[in-house]
Amino acid sequence: MVETARRPTKIESPLRPGGANPPEERLLEDLTPAQIVAELDKYIIGQIDAKRAVAVALRNRYRRQRLSEELRREVKPKNILMIGSTGVGKTEIARRVADIVQAPFVKVEATKFTEVGYVGRDVESIIRDLVEVSISMLHKQRLELVKDEAAHAAVERLAEIMSEQAVAQKAKRRTKRAETDEETELRESQAVERRRRREQKRLLELLNKQAIEEETVEIDVEPELDEDYGAWDYANGYEGDDLQDSLFDLLDSMLPRRRTRRRVSVREARRILAQQEADRLVDFDAILEDAIRRAEETGVVFIDEIDKTISSDNDVGGDVSGEGVQRDLLPIVEGSTVVTRYGPVRTDHVLFIAAGSFQSTRPSDLIPELQGRLPIRVELQSLTEDDLYAILTEPRNALTKQYQALLNVEGLDLQFTESGLREVARLATRVNQTSEDIGARRLQTILEKVIEEVSFTASDHAGESVEIDDGFVSQRVGELVEDEELSNFIL
């Protein structure tokens, strides 16, 4: 164990009232709605109305922070309802914009929840998940700030551990004297300490040069809570149970954490000790406080399939994932306090983005109160053949670029011609028209079929180049597309 006096000072939270603006507020200050849309354009094709609506909603957060405290309490977020078929970019817009402004983000499906009183997830678990995401984000950011200091402290601690073990090992091999006086014991103790210091200095030099990474050393490891007490299996239908969380918290407070002794490589020990040192440097209590504030002020919740909670005229069975879920959602969307394992969390200024295809229903079929809490409506357009072609070529994370990078690992140069990509877009459009329209997701299904053989044999063709043109595409998936019944199963 490292003595308390030798531990570095913990990094306190810089996010305090009266201090500098928090990072996410500074980021929003630097990003106008036009700039947010420009960032989204790098990843998402079209859907300008949805992009603009989300960009304005986020910019309003920054504007709200500049208001007086009295007025700031009155300004509520302008929640959004996105209407459009699957695969047109609803989720991607919400996820990307949250990433751009470094905001906590969770995506949930409305059909995964049930009314209060029934077995299953209740809607308040959405906010608990949001807090967990916020804590994880902030914890990673704080760990990154102390990474270098933690790595340095880990090397010093590892040199100390290894020197102690080396000296202890040598002492075991020596013959112990039958009788020694106090003066002799003192001299021997001082000699041992001098040897330990010399060994520690030698090891420190080797560790800094990474010259002994494959050697082994014994270190103490603190296991995670679930490793300590085993896995817990609860009744089906519970996902991320609060009962499980509460039980873990109770066990953690009542029972001591077991430290286990493990023999690992120096490389692994360096990683484990660096993590331990980083945890000592970071003030987790401050992280919790700031993470809750960040979830309350900047959190984004995307609720998909909201249209599937609308009961049809013929539904007389009382679906527990239907209208009752809308009524349970209403309090957290309009603003309430949710109790989490880390304390109460207010949802007044969380941005909610609901989405659905509304193919057999209408937004007006939602309960009136929930409609009123989703004042901004945007309709996303179905993707055309030109849109699908643009999706294959323009975004930074285009599928074609991903496949090229993956196969380049094997030394294979994969090239897509314009005619090949046009053919992929044409075939994807046709399959979407003749079967269920899943938008851009169809591109991945078709591309996987196109390069399946190339991907399978890539390691045998290192240094070669493969060109994907329209003939190549037609040869591999053309017949599947023409056979409508077969394409429904495969594409």
Image (cartoon, helix red, strand yellow):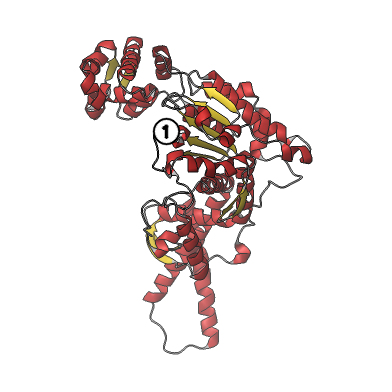
Q: Nearer the viewer, residue 136 or 131?
A: 131
Q: Can residue 71 be seen by looking at this rendering?
A: yes
Q: Which amino acid is tagged 1?
A: Ser
Q: Quadrant of residue 7?
A: bottom right
Can you give x and y, in whole percent of width and height, for residue 20 in the image?
A: 73, 41
Q: How many labels does the image show?
A: 1
Q: Which of 248 and 228 is in front in this view?
A: 248
Residue 195, placed above or below residue 414: below
Q: Can residue 199 be seen by looking at this rendering?
A: no
Q: In which quarter of the image is residue 65?
A: top right
Q: Which of 188 and 130 is in front in this view?
A: 130
Badge 1 crowding class, 10 Å Cα cut-off, few under 14, some 14 to 19, many 20 or more, is few
Q: In which quarter of the image is the C terminus?
A: top left
Q: Mark 1 points at which residue?
A: 312
Can you give x and y, in whole percent of width and height, for residue 216 in the image?
A: 37, 59
Can you give x and y, in whole percent of width and height, for residue 131 in the image?
A: 56, 47
Q: Answer left or right for 263 relative to 343.
A: left
Residue at 67% x, 28% y is 30
Q: Nearer the viewer, residue 259 or 131?
A: 131
Q: Answer left or right for 10 relative to 85.
A: right
Residue 391, placed above or below residue 7: above
Residue at 65% x, 31% y is 28
